[in-house]
Image (cartoon, helix red, strand yellow):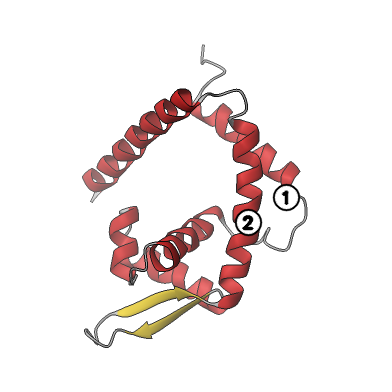
Amino acid sequence: MRSVTSIHYIYKNIEAMFKRVDPGKEHDHLAPSLFTYMEFIYYKNDILHEEVNQSTIEKEFVLPKASVNNALTHLEEKGYVNRVEDKLDKRKKLVSLTPEGKEIYLKIAKDHDIVSEALFKGFDKKERETLAKLLNKVVINIRKEKLNDK
């Protein structure tokens, strides 16, 4: 018999929390993976002040070129990202969030913060750090599996 703490069970409960925090908002149409790319672009551009191109995203998420291109095209069509030619390497396109993209990202991030606070209520600092380390191991395993699939 499966444990009630299976990853799927936890995922479904977290998903339900997001739906309660975010009922019918204008960004419901944004797939979680697209939000994740926007978050990465925002973090790299606005926090670290680093440039991002398509291959940066491909490497970070261990995804094929076509998948990232499709995602960026979708975000571009929505008006959330810009792709401009890299002046140093004309083969590359730099990716950044548009003002509308930043606005929608920040709205969604605010909702994520509300859910995160609820999820970690009662956790002390050490427990949060331990959980973060364990989840990072999960991410590393996922990346290894993706690399083995190629």
**Picture coordinates of residue 138, whole percent (x, y):** 36, 34
Position above or below: 77 against 39: below
Q: Which residue is mark 1?
A: 22
**Picture coordinates of residue 106, whole percent (x, y):** 60, 61
For mark 2, give the secondary structure: helix
User: For this rendering, which residue is in front, 82 or 3?
Assistant: 82
Position above or below: 24 against 124: below
Q: At 53% across and 58% down in the image, what residue appears?
A: 35
**Picture coordinates of residue 121, whole percent (x, y):** 62, 28
User: For this rendering, which residue is in front, 70 or 85?
Assistant: 85
Is 62 displayed left or right of 41 in the figure? Answer: left
Residue 86 seen in render: yes
State the residue lying farthest toward the front.
125
Mark 1, other Cα within 10 Å: few <14 / some 14–19 / many ≥20:
some
Position above or below: 143 against 49: above
State the residue lying farthest toward the right.
24
Q: At 53% across and 20% down in the image, what residue appears?
A: 5
Is 31 displayed left or right of 38 in the figure? Answer: right
Q: CA distance from mark 2 to mark 1?
A: 9 Å
Identify residue type, mark 1. Asp
Residue 78 seen in render: no
Q: How many marks?
A: 2
Is 71 displayed left or right of 29 in the figure? Answer: left
Rendering quarter of residue 4? top right
Which callout, 2 or 1, points at the residue further toward the start of the chain?
1
- Asked if disc 2 and disc 1 are in contact, CB closer than 8 Å, the reply is yes
Is 20 displayed left or right of 33 in the figure? Answer: right
Mark 2, other Cα within 10 Å: few <14 / some 14–19 / many ≥20:
some
